Image (tube, rainbow, N blue to C red):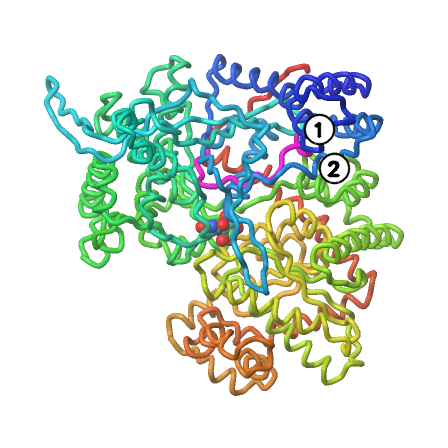
Amino acid sequence: MKLTIAEFKQDYIAQIKSSTARQINETTALERYTALGEMVKEYIGNLWANTNSTYRTEQVKQIYYFSMEFLTGKFMENNLNYLGIYEIVKDGLRSLDIDIDDILEVEVDQGLGNGGLGRLAAGFLDAMSSISIPGHGCGIRYKNGLFEQRIIDGYQVEFPDRWLVNNNVWEYKRNNKAVIVKYNGHVETHMDGERLKFELVNYDAVRAVPYDTPILGFENNTVNTLRLWSAEEIDDIFDFENFSKGNYLSAFEKKHSVEIITQILYPNDAYDEGKLLRLKQEYFFVSAGIQSIFNTYKKMNVGINRFAEFVAIHINDTHPALAIPELMRILLDEEEMTWEEAWKITTQCISYTNHTIMAEALEKWPLYMLRDLLPRITMIIEEIERRFTEDLINVYHITDPNHLSAMHIIYDGMVRMAHLSIIGSHSINGVAKLHTEILKNKELKVFYDIYPERFNNKTNGIMHRHWLLNANPGLTKLIGDTIGDGFKKNPRVLRDLLKYRDDKSFLDDLFEIKHQNKENLAKYIKDKQGIVVDPYAIFDMQAKRIHEYKRQHLNILHVMHLYRQLKENPNLDIPPRVFVFAGKSAPSYYVAKQIIKLINTVGSVINNDKSIKDKLKVVFLPNYGVSLASHMIPAADVSEQISTASKEASGTGNMKFMMNGAVTLATLDGANVEIMNEVGESNIILFGLKVEEVYDYYQNGHYNAYEIYNNSPDLKAVIDELVNGYLPVPKDEFIPIADRLLRFNDEFFILKDFESYRLAQERIAEIYRDKYQWSKMSLANIACSGAFSADYTIERYATSIWNVQKKLLDFKL
Ligand code: CJB
């Protein structure tokens, strides 16, 4: 947009006065931030209104991305960049004696997600807007986002994330768009002429109120909507009778039981706890979202039969799978379609992404629970199941009971949401090539056999503009000065940087930028953790949820091994190394929490040992989230992507590190395989078991952790240190970890992969000694990372799954 510094200053001073009734020099950083947010919102508002009215009047097909999680982080810097006014605002503020960084710092992360899945959803919204795809998000406005992690005495301690305390400047509450969501009750049937009608009676009603956040596209005038639903009492729920009798508490009980639905994000990643409240949440936003799609759709006036021509609904994992029976319910009970008509529309509209093969993440609900909470929805699921079984027998000629059992939606009293999602949608995609192959050939093979055309791959992508423009301005400037700014819209042109791989002065610049980022992080580590690290050391990072399959314990066991080597020979000639960890554990995941404690315990021993001459440091940075990642990733030399092959569906952190010039230390898992293909085998460090070997071990049962332990003195020594009193903790502290490795036979092959991991780490140390060789590898990673932009991923979803077209918008601000 066009804005001069003088115009900005004038607007801003006026805004400060009207929103704070104070002189600018008397205002707090928060007030300054809020005033700026109000202004930016007004600029965006014009574009937003234009986008919505164009979609409506030109009858544009729209895609609705349903997700339990949207981990959007902060908005301000992005919005300023996308409007093209960041520099103007920065300079304008500076002339008012305000540092823009102080303002940006005040914004709290919108942390309505656990990790990869939620961040992906946020990135997809950004990409949809930025490549002009008419697409919106639908989710839950949790009052408490993912907990704040603090480390106390080495342990993770959880604190509530009250992100709404200071108000959220970006959202609009839309009371006039509220809808009612119905729970419990029972279904009555009656004949209406020829038609059997179903009616839910005696239900509990909850008011779903939407809060809309504008999602701005990059310099293209598009503003799509993220609609998050909040549960509120409806007027007649408030219990006046009790209140007037003086029973104040019970009068509020109902109100609380309603509001609790959107109080908290479940803090589990890839783990299904099966709680009733979670089921209520799932139905809550799905029902509200679909009702509101109908309300918007009807304004287009094109007739209900054409619904699938104008609406696509994507379900991000199975959490929103009730969208299938909910859409059926509305088409059957409210729009009075036949089952066949309704089913056709439903399967044409819905598409589904699978994000994991981990068995404990696959959602199943007890049938009795579902029937109690959602009686009409359950009837519809049962009818879907009945017709599906009929097809299996009559169309696909499957009669073997075991084969049928493997495919039922309802089995053993449980409703399998992945099966419902596959049966009720026209597209099922995995999130990396390898993952999709595993789905097709192993985990979901029975479905692939009957629906091969439904399965496809859509490798994940990242918000490349965030990870470069916002997170790494130094690198962004170097890239822009070298190959121009085309990469902002078309990140594949980053490949042009490969021309500079033998240009020493360019490699020096690259090294210098990385070094500066490392200096900044070193300062952050010193300020926050009191640990001094050498910015010339190798910064080796593992930042992601803590999980046994992600194998943070493989990493820390190797650190313990390095430490033993240094203790034996303090003059050992190795480049100094800093191992940085970050990530949250699910509060109820005991072993993962012990891994955090182990990292911190090992850190406290190593960091305080002067005898090793600062050659090794271990840092655990608390409260990993989008903001911390944005500080860390630009400073990484080595990116640890070391999951047990087959377990990490894709990974997206791997792409962010690559884009910022880190060299990946990887197993051939998830999208690491594609990273290798983009960057070439000489620019990635690989180790460990391959997928087939992992499956082989699981199938033939020949794996023996004790055998490896007994035959590897180095490994045995560090595992023994977990339990022999060597570490300054009670002797039994780390027994659960040791038990998982030995007594329970090491499900994730830490022991098996240890030696090849150690050798891979040795190679890294070797290569790092040669500054130019290292910088060349780093450059190759940056140059080849463009392929992993979510812009391209969304392009592929739009053309091959959703069938939505770009809508270019012309509007002058
Ligand atoms: N994933 O973040 C989650 N939560 C889940 O419940 C299941 C999977 C992750 O999704 C990411 C986005 O697709 C993947 O990159 C990652 O491998 C997967 O673990």
Q: Quadrant of the C terminus?
A: top right
Q: State the CA–CA distance, disc 2 to disc 1.
A: 9 Å
Of 59 and 378, nearer the camera is: 378
Of 227 and 688, nearer the camera is: 227
Quick check: 76 left or right of 236? right
Residue at which label 2 appears: 102
Residue at which label 1 appears: 32
Residue 289: give x, y in percent of width and height: 39, 29
Residue 741: give x, y in percent of width and height: 48, 75
Q: Is disc 2's CB within 8 Å of ligand 1?
A: no
| Residue located 46% across and 50% down the image | 267
Q: Which mark is residue 190?
A: none
| Residue located 57% across and 20% down the image | 48
Residue 432 appears in view = no
Secondary structure under tag 2 reads helix
Is residue 554 positioned above or below 420 on the image? below
| Residue located 57% across and 69% down the image | 598
Residue 103: give x, y in percent of width and height: 72, 34
Q: Are marks 2 and 1 in contact (CB under 8 Å)?
A: yes
